[in-house]
Image: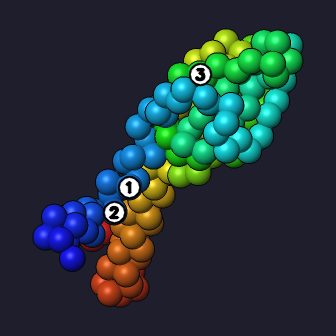
């Protein structure tokens, strides 16, 4: 095995798992032919077709699917579903807890929530729960009647 191949393999194995998570929240890579990406869902935004798929690709067609163009998307994680409750207002969701919103029929998207936010919220809840339980334990250790803080 070539020393360069061995070194590259070692570097890849040494990358922290955090790097993979952060990659998901980099903007989607621009593609020359985005309609050939792996697309997983499609919806109508008025007369516009909007499809979502792997690597954060969102494609738009204003001519009933004859031609497609790629939207600017703030994530590169796989997007699995898209819905437009109103012609201009839509939501897309995907892996890593990504929730995207558009107010211009899919031309631009903003990240509303993701798994990192969920983890921060859960951690804050868990820490507050630990504090509450520690207070109960401390009160029990002080014995009956000591809970009032004498």
Check the picture and name the quadrant holding the C terminus. Answer: bottom left
Q: Residue at x 77, y 40 (%)?
A: 41
Say whether marks 2 and 1 touch (CB < 8 Å): yes
Mark 3, residue position: 71
How many tags in the picture?
A: 3
Tell which tag, 3 or 2, sits nearer the viewer.
3
Give the spatial CA distance, label 3 vs label 2.
28 Å
Q: Is residue 92 above or below residue 119?
A: above
Which of marks 2 and 3 precedes in the sequence?
2
Give the spatial CA distance, label 3 vs label 1.
23 Å
Mark 1, residue position: 20
Q: Residue at x 54, y 43 (%)?
A: 55
Give the spatial CA distance, label 2 vs label 1.
5 Å
Neighbours of disc 1 within 10 Å: few (<14), some (14-19), many (20+): few
Say whether marks 3 and 2 touch (CB < 8 Å): no
Residue 123 image position (x, y, % from top left): 41, 59
Residue 60 image position (x, y, % from top left): 71, 21
Check the picture and name the quadrant holding the N terminus. Answer: bottom left
């Amino acid at each position: 095995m070539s020393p360069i191949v061995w070194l590259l393999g070692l570097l890849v194995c040494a990358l922290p798992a955090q790097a993979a998570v952060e990659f998901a929240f980099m903007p989607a890579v621009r593609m020359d032919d985005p309609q050939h990406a792996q697309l997983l869902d499609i919806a109508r935004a008025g007369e516009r077709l909007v499809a979502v798929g792997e690597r954060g690709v969102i494609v738009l067609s204003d001519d009933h699917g004859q031609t497609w163009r790629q939207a600017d998307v703030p994530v590169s994680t796989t997007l699995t579903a898209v819905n437009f409750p109103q012609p201009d207002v839509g939501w897309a969701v995907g892996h890593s807890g990504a929730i995207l919103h558009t107010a211009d029929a899919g031309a631009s998207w903003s990240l509303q929530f993701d798994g990192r936010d969920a983890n921060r919220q859960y951690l804050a809840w868990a820490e507050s729960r630990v504090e509450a339980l520690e207070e109960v334990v401390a009160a029990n250790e002080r014995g009956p009647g000591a809970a009032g803080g004498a």
